[in-house]
Image (spheres, rainbow, N blue to C red):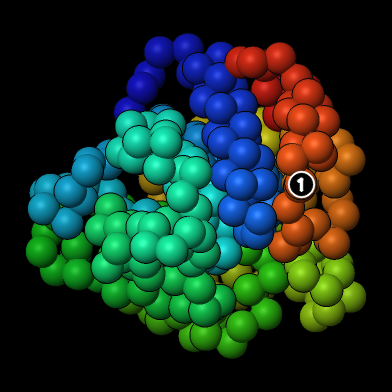
Amino acid sequence: MDTSSPTKKLAHHAYEIRKAILEMTTIAGSGHLGGSLSSVDILTTLFFYILNYSENPLQTIDNDRFILSCGHICPALYATLAETGYLKKEELLTLRQLNSRLQGHPSHTDLPIVETSSGSLGQGLSVALGKALALRLKREKGRVYCFMSDGEQEEGSVWEAAMAASHYCANNLIAIVDRNNLQISGATENVIGLAPLGEKYRAFGWRVIEADGHNFASLINAFKEAREVKQRPSVIIAKTVLGKGVKSIENNYRWHGKVFNRQELKEALNDLGTKGTARSEK
């Protein structure tokens, strides 16, 4: 964990990660841009400030685990891993290519640093709970962080896992919901209303913490609070903007699964702003 004046460093990393997402999805000609961009500041905070992480997480005592439940936003995870140095940045340009380790949904078999293969929405929280309980049985101090989209909160399996996590007092489990309010077919509240999402988790026995998903100080405080919770799991509901960083696509659900062509890429990169300056701080 880096404890020295994190904001400027995190802003720089977030810029580089967004830039990489735009480039790799354009070259691939496919991918999920909207949610990848909305998740960047959360992933940046996790991997550069919060997580006790290593290249061989399963072989490291007291190592934290990260589960990406919404596997379709894997460009953000791949770009983050490259920014940390766990992947070579050149490999990002192989996204979705034949024989690439960077598949359209994460594959633990191809990329072991990814804790679990994912893609079928709603499964990640169950996997994360299993890992959290296993760590407790082994008396390891690591925590399990599970990143979910808000659209997948419509899956019944999420709530089965939420109920079990509370029952087993899994206080080493911290879930994060990317609450950008949009999914592939429109607003979440029009598809299947989730509000009041926080009250639902509270009713299931969870500690609920709300945060600005594009403000590093808010996110850091939320994660610190979650780590102090005893006897129950925690969920951070992070309010975000779909497509964050590229104004032309922000809050437009049609960019859930679209990418830029090469000409549009130039305009999008210009829209990101000055290197090292995060729009998320404004």
| Residue 96, above or below 43 | below
> How many C-alpha atoms fall within 10 Å of the one at disc 1: few (<14), some, or many (≥20)?
some
- Give whichever of 191, 34 is nearer the camera: 34
Does residue 79 appear in this view?
Answer: yes
Q: Position of residue 268 (x, y in %)?
A: 78, 34
Q: Position of residue 163 (x, y in %)?
A: 48, 81
Residue found at x 37% / y 32%: 84
Quadrant (top left/top right/bottom left/bottom right) for the C terminus: top right
| Residue 267, above or below 117 | above
Q: Which residue is mark 1?
A: 261
Does residue 147 appear in this view?
Answer: no
Q: Is residue 140 left or right of residue 189?
A: left
Q: Secondary structure at mark 1?
A: loop
Q: Amino acid at mark 1?
A: Asn
Q: Is residue 19 left or right of residue 141?
A: right
Q: Position of residue 41 (x, y in %)?
A: 59, 37
**Which image quadrant is residue 230 in?**
bottom left
The total of numbered circles placed on residues is 1
Residue found at x 65% / y 40%: 22
Quadrant (top left/top right/bottom left/bottom right) for the N terminus: top left
Q: Is residue 216 left or right of residue 89?
A: right
Residue found at x 80% / y 57%: 255
Q: Position of residue 236 (x, y in %)?
A: 57, 52
